[in-house]
Image (spheres, grey):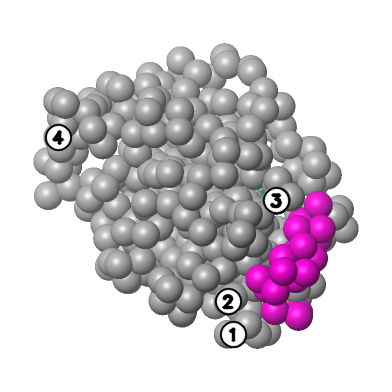
Amino acid sequence: MDKHELQDAVEDLHAKYQPLRDGQVATYIPELGKADPDQFAISLVTASGRTFEAGDCERPFTIQSISKPFTFGMALETYGHSKVARHVGVEPSGDAFNAINLQQGTNRPHNPMINSGAITITALLHACHGDETFDRMLERFSVAAGRSLSVDDAVYESERRTGHRNRAIAHLLLNFGMVHEQAEHALDVYFRQCAILVTCRDLAVMGATLANMGRNPLTGDTAFEIGSVRSMLAIMFTCGMYDYSGEWAYRVGVPAKSGVSGGVVAVVNRQLGVATFSPRLDARGNSHRGIEVCSELAARFGLHAFDCLNAGSSFLELVL
Ligand code: DON
């Protein structure tokens, strides 16, 4: 593998999937409906900080659900695994990301990658950090991305005004004592965390930070402890693509997370962060082009965790 081969592959994939027009831009958060459906970017950052890109990798969009593995990592570092596990499980739900249901018996959300689990994680962080919670998130996400991130206030307001389903989930959690009394405050932080602005390149750097065991390869700053990264990647592998997670693990075979604004981040352990941005989504809320690009990239370069050729290790040449 040399760097020209990888840059050529990224450009080829961008040209190949640019004409794909399947899917719809999310509109249930009204402000997201204003996105240009033709936007398309691919960014790869190796665990040594080399970047390979095509398309408009500097155009900002809101992170949405891709915030979830990162807040999960923060909760693990604040409370430890056993306390977090009392509030949120680690099983794929098989349901849509915004399903209003909890695990039978325990009344926990199935996992931290769906809305109910992520709201619970944010409530846990809010119980510890109160009014500082959001600033701490923004700071940690910024370390992972290697630059100071900010919030899209219009998207935040739009979801705050219309997020009745998430409000119902928060109140169901409150009913079962899974979140503290200030559920509305926690929900407000959750809406804000979803409205953090990132670019496709930022997401690839955040992915590369996880690939590099929690240390941002561009700045050398540590964003997450190595033990949390293990848990973040494991949950992304099993639950990151919602009710498509099983098929994704089978077909693509790397930990990943998608968001309704059209981002996808995928992590090749110890080697590479991959990000795509394209706002047209399939019925499950995953970016159509994102799925196609990641599948083809994985097949072409043997990135699947269980690829018998294990060609993914060829990226190590670029990493070292
Ligand atoms: O809570 C919501 O519905 C959004 N703020 C985030 C959902 C999301 O990104 C799911 N992704 N596919």
Element type where label 3 sits in the image:
loop
Region of the chain picked out in magenta, as a range? 165-182
| Whole-percent x, y for residue 138 in the image | 56, 70
Determine which of the numbered discs, if any, sits on residue 125 in the image: 2
Mark 1 and mark 3 lie on one chain; the one further toward the N terminus is: 3
User: How far apart, in angstroms, are the residues tagged by discs 1 and 4?
Assistant: 43 Å
Quarter residue 96 falls in: top right
- Under mark 4, the amino acid is Ser
* Residue on which disc 4 sits: 314
Which one is in front, 41 or 105?
105
Determine which of the numbered discs, if any, sits on residue 101 in the image: 3
Q: Nearer the viewer, mark 3 or mark 4?
A: 3
Q: Nearer the viewer, mark 1 or mark 3?
A: 3
Q: Nearer the viewer, mark 1 or mark 4?
A: 1
* Residue on which disc 1 sits: 129
Q: Residue at the location (41% across, 63% down)?
A: 144
Element type where label 2 sits in the image:
helix
Quarter residue 11 falls in: top left
- Under mark 3, the amino acid is Asn
Q: Is residue 258 left or right of residue 123?
A: left
Label 4 packing within 10 angstroms: few (<14), some (14-19), many (20+): some
Q: Main secondary structure of the magenta part?
A: helix
Q: Residue furthest front?
A: 105
Disc 2, disc 1: CB below 8 Å? yes
Which one is in front, 59 or 255?
255
